[in-house]
Image (cartoon, grey):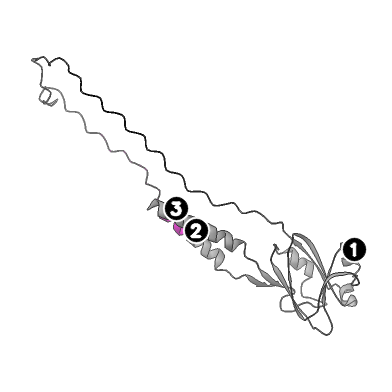
Amino acid sequence: MADRVYYLFLVLFSALITCSSRAHQLTVGGKNGWVVNPSENYNHWAERLRFQVNDTLLFKYKKESDSVVVVNTKSDYDNCNTGNPKLKLDDGNSVYKFDRSGPVFFISGNKSNCAAGQKLIVVVMAVRNHPSPPKAPSPAPTPAPSPALPPSEGPAPESSDGPSANSTPADAGGEAPHPHRRSLAAPAWNPSVALVLTVSLVLSVCGGGFIVSL
């Protein structure tokens, strides 16, 4: 039973790691989308969130009058330089996937919109290596049985007038020993409790939504 619970715990532990590393998609600007005057400054919005590798950003905007430009440097970001883009998205419903950690600079393809504040910096967190699940303990080796020794012949026991070996202390005139008090052992650890807690944690992580629209 203990081995079975242990392996179930390993499976749930692996599922928890998978859920925690699942990618998220976030909509830039929420319901307003990628616009000149958002309800919340884009950089303030980004500072409230945590971005990881493989997360995606969804940009919604008017295809005919706007676009999203990914620039290489902070200088191009500050000066709204659209002439040397790293990537340009212009389909009106653009998705950008983070493939590395570090800062990523977005500006509007319309230079006047960028000058009015339609730009965004996202800092992607570095990838963390998840610890591997603990290995099952190896069974302890069974000690080899020691060879049996032949019984030795000893002198015949001498008879005595004392109490016989089968007589009890009460028969010998002594007081009977008090029975041993039962020790109160601590309750054994129930592995099913840990299993229930782990299942609850996995469901709470995996059951949540992974598309955030702020």
Q: Which residue is the extreme one toward the bottom?
A: 64
Q: Do the CB atoms of the residues marked 1 and 2 lie less than 8 Å apart?
A: no
Which segment did they paint magenta? 180-198
From the image, tell me which residue sits under label 3. 6
Amino acid type, callout 2: Val
Question: Looking at the image, is mark 2 or mark 3 earlier in the sequence?
Answer: 3
Q: Residue at x 78, y 70 (%)?
A: 42
> Quadrant of residue 36 in the image?
bottom right
Alpha carbon separation for disc pair 1 and 3: 55 Å
Label 1 crowd bin: few (<14), some (14–19), many (20+), radius 10 Å:
few
Mark 1 or mark 3: which comes first in sequence?
Answer: 3
Amino acid type of disc 3?
A: Tyr
For this view, does 169 lie left or right of residue 209?
A: left
Which tag is nearer the camera, tag 1 or tag 2?
2
Q: Is residue 58 magenta?
A: no
The residue under the point 75% across, 68% down is: 45
Residue 184: within the magenta?
yes
Residue of label 2: 11
Classify mark 1: helix, strand or loop.
Answer: helix
Kindly identify which residue carries mark 1.
75
- Asked if 166 appears above or below 49 in the picture, the reply is above
Residue type at numbered disc 1: Ser
